[in-house]
Amino acid sequence: MPKGKGAKGTKLTLKVAKKAIWMTLDGRRRLTLSNMGITIFPKCLLKLTNVDELDLSRNLMQKLPDNIGSFWSLSWLDLHSNKLESVPESIGNLVGLTHLNLSNNCLISTGLPSTLGSLTSLKSLNLGMNQLDTLPPTMEALDGLQELGLFDNLFINLPEYLKVLRNLTKVNVKRNPLSYVQRDAEGMQKEQSQAKEDVYLIHESSLCQTCLKKCQEQREGLPRGGGGDVFEEKRIRSYDGLMVPNSVAKVNQDVWRIRKVEHKPIK
């Protein structure tokens, strides 16, 4: 497929891009260029920095422009299912961003800039289906973050600072090689890889009363000491208000950023 052309051979000119802008029902200007076979970020889009939402998902881009931060009015950015290996530092300039989807790319931990910690308006951040094993320490500043997707990565341990993000209610860490502690009869601890069971963290408020009671009973009945028979104690960390249920949540954690949007063309 020629560079700069979409799935049907349409050249991505400024004129074509403008025709792809829609006004959502809540009055936001959305530019949708999903699944168009784009291999290189179209430079013409940098002339449309007044859009509120930008969807470039399901393309073939390996790199974002260094000045991606010039989209000063963006509140919603969807880049899932590309081939991105890193994110430019200028993304930290998108201070109004509330939703960022970078799932299903080729990101490694060194490809995430420290400037992610500047996105203090973020409510939802999806980093699932990459090759991450750590997160930038600066993300501790994302106090407004409510949902964090880390599924299908390489995390052995979760970042310690997740426990101080007071608004964080959902953390999807399914299909990671998370470690847990194994105690033997002498009370010795050994780190083991968790490969048998998928887990994710969810806030207690997202559980029904029956499931909440069940989880609390299981947590209270967890063995604490050594001696006697060998047993395993699952340990994902102790985050206030977060529990570790499987398939007991009100919301299906496998579904992330699936968003049905009704829109009408701009006249």
Image (cartoon, grey):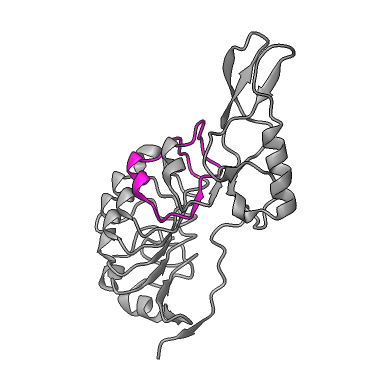
Corner quadrant of residue 110: top left
Residue 258 showing in the rendered view: yes
Q: How many labels sit on residues?
A: 0
Relative to 256, 163 lies left or right: left
Region in magenta: 130-159
- Along the horizontal axis of the image, is 172 left or right of 212? left
Is residue 33 placed above or below 93 in the rendered structure?
Answer: below
Q: Is residue 187 left or right of residue 70?
A: right
Residue 247 visible? The answer is: no
Q: Quadrant of residue 231?
A: top right
Q: Is residue 137 magenta?
A: yes
Q: Nearer the viewer, residue 98 or 208?
A: 208
- Residue toward you, 144 or 173: 144
Residue 2 position, x and y percent, is: 40, 61
Quadrant showing the N terminus? bottom left
Residue 204 screen position, x and y as percent = 61, 50
Does 109 lie within the magenta span? no
The C terminus sits in image quarter: bottom left
Q: Quadrant of residue 189?
A: top right
Residue under the image location 29 percent in, 48 percent down = 115
Q: Residue furthest top?
A: 186
Q: Main secondary structure of the magenta part?
A: loop
Q: Residue at x 56, y 32 (%)?
A: 178
x and y percent of residue 211 in the render?
72, 49
